[in-house]
Structure formats: C-alpha cells, structure tokens
Image (cartoon, rainbow, N blue to C red):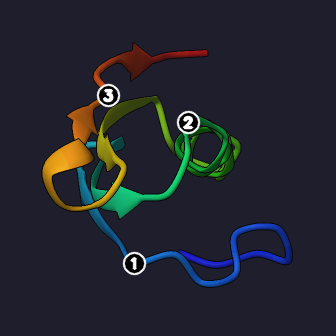
Amino acid sequence: MSNRNTGGLAIDVDTRNAVVTLSGSVKSDAEAELAGRIAQNTRGVSSVENQLTVGEGSHCRRRGGTRSP
C-alpha cells in the first residue's frame, strides 16, 4: 500500500466480497488511520477491517476496528 504520505508501508491487504482486511505493522496511530482511510476510499470497498499493529518489538499494540461508509 502506498501513496505520497505512507512512504510505502509494509501492510498486507486482503480483499474478499468488497471487505478489505489490513494487517502488518506501522509506526504510529496516524499511519494506521491513514491506511484505513486510503482503503475505505477505494472504489468498490464496502468496509475495512483494520488489524494493524502499532509500534515495534515489545512495544507493539494492536489496533482494531471496522469502518464502513
């Protein structure tokens, strides 16, 4: 997943029946939120399961949430 603000984050994107699931790790809540917004704003996406982990190593925490239009 990449746009000019994400810098090519290492995010796995899976899609099934117009539902996008994001997984992987990002450095901040802002990056996780941005990735979710990019996915949600993609034509044909009905909802986004944001399962991104924020942080590195032992300081990781899991974000959760589903966004629908």
Q: Which residue occupies 18% across, 61% down?
A: 57
Q: Is residue 7 above or below residue 62?
A: below
Mark found first going from the N terminus, 3 or 2: 2
17 or 69, which is in the foreground?
A: 69
Using the numbered discs, state the Cα–Cα distance from disc 2 to disc 1 in whole angstroms.
Answer: 15 Å
User: Nearest the camera: 66 or 24?
Assistant: 24
The reply, left or right, for residue 4 in relation to residue 26 is right
| Residue under numbered circle 1 | 10
Q: Amino acid at mark 2?
A: Asp
Residue at left 50%, top 16%?
68
Which amino acid type is shown beneath numbered disc 1? Ala
Name the kind of residue labelled 3 in the image.
Arg
Outermost residue, bottom direction? 8
Disc with the residue nearer the chain's start (2 vs 1):
1
Q: What label sits on residue 63 in the rendered view?
A: 3
Eyeballing the image, is 29 above or below 38? above
Query: Are the residues at dot 3 and dot 2 in contact (C-beta closer than 8 Å)?
Result: yes
Q: Quadrant of residue 23?
A: bottom left
Q: Residue at x 70, y 69 (%)?
A: 6
Which of pointers 2 and 1 indicates the residue nearer the eye? 2
Circle on res. 29: 2
Above or below, comparing residue 58 to residue 25 in the picture: above
Secondary structure type for disc 2 = helix
Residue ID at (28%, 22%): 64
In the picture, which quadrant includes the C terminus? top right
Does residue 63 lie above or below 57 as drawn?
above
x then y, percent, for residue 63? 32, 28
